[in-house]
Image (cartoon, helix red, strand yellow):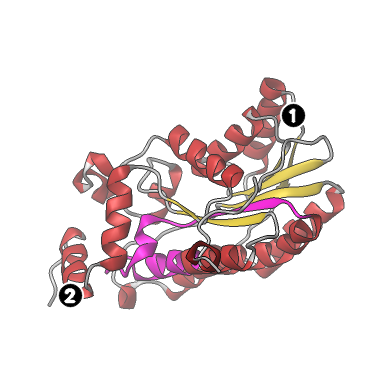
Amino acid sequence: MRLRDLHPGQSETVSLPQPSPDATVVVTGASSGIGEALAHELASRGHNVTLIARRRKRLQALAAAFEEAHGISARFHVADLSTTRGRKTALSAIGADGRVVAGLCNNAGVGRFGAFHEEEPRRLNALVALNVDAVHELTLALLPSMVERGEGAVLNVASILGHGPVPNNASYSASKAFVVTLSEAIHTELWGTGVSCTAFSPGPVRTDAIAASGVEELIPFTPGIFFTDIGGVARAGVDAMESGRRTAVPGLANQLFAAGSRYLPRTITLPLSFAASKLKPS
């Protein structure tokens, strides 16, 4: 057995199948930001899409725009994936649609900036529920049918901050580390099935999520080389689904950051990341 067989980084066949009238790609957090861009990119390549988010009017407008611009079928379902009820609602609606789920983009997520012990428990619990529980539950529910058919692709949106601990972003970085390790392990288990699970780790992108995470004041201090164009991020994500990659990190600077976070000693990375948060240890 070759080393590549033991540690496959790419599926042996194209994972995301060609667009089909009776199939769809599910995108969560699709009402704005990276989720909207992923849905747009998929639609532009001829895929039907199923949009999941909380804002009905926004989803309705996007679905109509995608259908008109790309001639595909776009459906949407309103659900708050940070709640057990919302996740059940979304999965029930996807099943009721009667379309084959050819792909899943687990993009819905939120961040929080601040010292862990000073945060509101309600906010951090909701973060973990959305960033971790929703990814876990939707992947667990939708992956088996892909394996049964022998084709399909899951794109789990993590972050470059998920490749190591980040002070003042403890819960967020830990939640994205869960996404990275879960996805890489599942991808390896799927070797030979025709299905892939990609850990997708973008760097910072100027989206609505920045305001929701309360980190706007840090943006001026973030080097511009780490920011990536949202359209380029979406193309990289869908390319990774099509080629069945285990991991994908858009942008050279972000690739170096992720590698450093993963492989450099914590005695180096933790003080640096703490200093970068503009706070001083007591």
Residue type at tag 2: Thr
Provide the residue span drawn in magenta.
150-179
Question: What secondary structure is found at the residue carrying circle 1?
Answer: loop
Expressed as whole percent of the image width and height from the top left, the position of residue 136 reads: 61, 68
Question: What secondary structure is found at the residue carrying circle 2?
Answer: helix
Q: Is residue 207 above or below residue 143?
A: above
- Label total for image: 2
Residue where numbered disc 2 is placed: 267
To which quarter of the image does residue 25 belong?
top right
Instruction: Judge from the rendering whether residue 265 lies leftward or rightward of residue 99; answer left or right.
Output: left
Residue nearer the viewer, 130 or 174: 174
Q: Is residue 97 above or below residue 42?
A: below
Q: CA distance from mark 1 to mark 2?
A: 51 Å
In the image, residue 152 lies in the stretch drawn in magenta:
yes
Residue where numbered disc 1 is placed: 72
To which quarter of the image does residue 22 belong?
top right
- N-term-proximal mark, 1 vs 2: 1
Expressed as whole percent of the image width and height from the top left, the position of residue 146 reads: 75, 56
- On the question of residue 126 being in view, the answer is no
**Few, some or many residues within 10 Å of mark 2 (<14, 14–19, 20+):** few
Query: At x 66% / y 39%, what residue is drawn?
Result: 59
Residue type at tag 1: Ile
